[in-house]
Amino acid sequence: MAAGDGEPEPAVQQRPQLQSKNVCVVGGGMAGLAAARELRREGHAVTVMEQSGDVGGQWLYDPAPTRGLVPSASSAYASLRLRTPREAMGFSDFQLLPRDGAGRDPRRFPGHREVHCYLRDFCAAFGLMDAVRLNTRVVRVAPTSTATRQWAVRSVRRLGGPEDGARAEEEEEEAVFDAVVVATGQYSHPVLPSGIEGAGEWRRRQLHSHLYRTPEPFRGEAVVVVGCGDSGTDIALDLRRVARVVHLAAGSEASTPAVSRMVANHGDVLRLHPRARRLHADGRVSFDDGSSVVADTVIYCTGYGYSFPFLDTGGAVAVGDGGCVVGPLFEHVFPPSLAPSLSFVGVPRKVLVPWFVEAQARWVAQACRGNTPTTTSTALT
Ligand SMILES: Cc1cc2nc3c(=O)[nH]c(=O)nc-3n(C[C@H](O)[C@H](O)[C@H](O)COP(=O)(O)OP(=O)(O)OC[C@H]3O[C@@H](n4cnc5c(N)ncnc54)[C@H](O)[C@@H]3O)c2cc1C
């Protein structure tokens, strides 16, 4: 039958119905803000729930990370500077360009505050702040009992009052959304090493790099830094300015040229050791080669794990391997049985973060409209 004979054209007949959805984004860091922007661009109604008092996630420096009712999400220390150049740290149509103004940092590898300013600029440029609910912690995300695939999102909002006191008032709320985007980051839940004996009984100071901010509290001390990744090397260099001695305990990662150069340049204070094996009651820390040193503090720069304590999917998506993996996720974004109404933005590691989360967010926004496929039953990650 020819077109115009009363039957719609096949192409028109098969085109899926495009819909605008009511979407909740959990987390107001770089990934959550990218999601909000892309969802809006596709015509969805967006609510971003952010537990902190501002957007920015890791780039919202918190000088007192243990003060609030909820531990700080940010693991940024005062001296943190970008490892990626600013050219690779902006979204595709909103570059991280040097700007004039108080507190701005024009360097190519600027400090953490510059990235926070940039994310605030991004929100202002695209009018995102009216979609953001600050001081709002999501405590449960679960499917509704209705036949339609919707999500009940329960959140707790802090209503002013002293941030550091148990007296801060809170208000609980539950709302239903058509879709939820999880963008809660991956550098807020410390992973501690399991292979170091005696750590539970050691009476001297131990902390994870998540809580490290400045070197000053360690002035004059002998500090053992466990782990030699980005945080371990940054923090060891920070400490060498005030500590009596800094012992770096590391495995294979210690054999990189960068670490060798660092130890060679600062050999007066920095000492390299094999993996830490045991903490002793007399204050000694011993290493895999049988040697030991007396330490005042041990700082674990041993990384972070995934954690989604609010998510109740009945096992459709879960965290495993001690926090190292989350899945099953098609292309690291969609749990196959729940796509596209549940998605994750910002899960992969070792990527150029802004470009990657922007692409993921665009896919999620289009998938929620129903105009792009989301899963196949194969190639799950
Ligand atoms: C020390 C350090 C240095 C880094 N350096 C670089 C670098 O040089 N270059 C680079 O590209 N990347 C770097 N990163 C990675 C950095 O994390 C990413 O650039 C980016 O911040 C990731 O954004 P995100 O939105 O995925 O996560 P986050 O920035 O962690 O944001 C997640 C947000 O979710 C919120 N949230 C969590 N749970 C809830 C809840 N239940 N309810 C409501 N809100 C919630 C948190 O408060 C937070 O604001 C670094 C990270 C760290 C820790």
Image: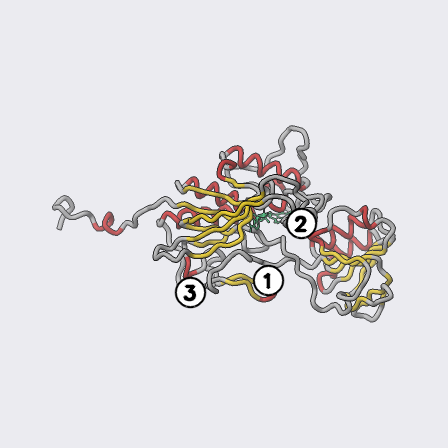
Quick check: is the Cβ at mark 2 less than 8 Å away from ligand 1? yes
Three-letter amino acid code at the position of disc 2: Ser
User: Looking at the picture, how far across and down is residue 363, in whole percent?
Assistant: 43, 49
Where does label 1 land, which residue?
323
The label shown at residue 75 is 2
Comparing 202 with 344, the one in front is 202
Label 1 – label 2 distance at C-alpha: 17 Å
- The secondary element bearing badge 2 is classed as loop
User: Looking at the picture, how far across and down is residue 221, in whole percent?
Assistant: 86, 53
The label shown at residue 225 is none
Determine which quarter of the picture holds residue 373: bottom left
Are the residues at dot 3 and dot 2 in contact (C-beta closer than 8 Å)?
no
Regarding residue 88, the answer to whether it shows in the image is no
Q: Is residue 23 above or below residue 313?
A: above
User: Looking at the picture, how far across and down is residue 248, in whole percent?
Assistant: 79, 59
Are the residues at dot 3 and dot 1 in contact (C-beta closer than 8 Å)?
no
Where does label 3 land, which residue?
378
Is disc 3 surrounded by few (<14), some (14 to 19) or many (20+) residues within 10 Å?
Answer: few
Three-letter amino acid code at the position of disc 3: Thr
User: Looking at the picture, how far across and down is residue 287, in whole percent?
Assistant: 80, 67
Determine which quarter of the picture holds residue 308: bottom right
Residue beneath the point at 45% across and 64% down: 379
Display colour scheme: secondary structure
Is disc 1 surrounded by few (<14), some (14 to 19) or many (20+) residues within 10 Å?
Answer: some
